[in-house]
Amino acid sequence: NEKEDTIHELQHRISRLEGVLHLEEMITTSGGKIFATNGKKADFHTTLEKCQESGGSIATPRNMSENDAILYFVKKYNTYAYLGIKESLIPSKFQFLDGTKLSYSNWHSKEPSGKGEE
């Protein structure tokens, strides 16, 4: 079937591309999600825009494994990472950018404080 052959070929090409990106340490995966970076520093708005332009979204860790995938890049580039999380209207309560309540968090002790890296 031509449709199945095309799907198989696309899956093979995607797998090869993912392999190259893994070798270049530009992506890591967790739970079926791909976490990626270009390694460049940018402000939050630019980061959000670039993620959307590439068909993705800014990282939103929903469990320890996804948090570790983000932490991989934080350690590799010795920098912070923006997350798709914001403070809600209730001070010290956080939510995803779409307003969904957080179901997972892993803040450092006494964080978030709103004073730099959280």
Image (cartoon, rainbow, N blue to C red):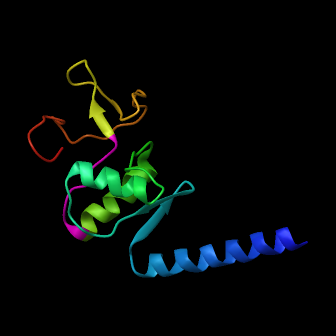
Query: Is 84 displayed left or right of 31 in the figure?
Result: left
Seen as rendered, the residue at the extreme top is 90
Percent position of residue 108, x then y: 21, 42
Task: Note whether 69 is above or below 87 in the view shown.
Answer: below
Residue 6's quadrant in the figure?
bottom right
Q: Please say whether residue 78 is one of the residues in the magenta stretch.
A: yes
Residue at coordinates 18% horizontally, 43% vertically from top-left? 118
Range drawn in magenta: 77-84
Residue at coordinates 41% horizontally, 52% vertically from top-left? 52
Classified by dominant secondary structure, the portion drawn in magenta counts as: loop
Query: Is 13 displayed left or right of 33 in the figure?
Result: right
Seen as rendered, the residue at the extreme right is 1
Residue situated in front as seen by the camera: 36 or 44: 44
Percent position of residue 80, x then y: 21, 56
Query: Is 72 displayed left or right of 78 in the figure?
Result: right
Residue situated in front as seen by the camera: 34 or 63: 34
Query: Is 18 displayed left or right of 76 in the figure?
Result: right
Percent position of residue 39, x then y: 28, 70
Residue 99's quadrant in the figure?
top left
Residue at coordinates 21% horizontally, 59% vertically from top-left? 42
Percent position of residue 63, x then y: 44, 44
Q: Please say whether residue 13 is one of the residues in the magenta stretch.
A: no
Task: Note whether 12 is above or below 28 in the view shown.
Answer: below
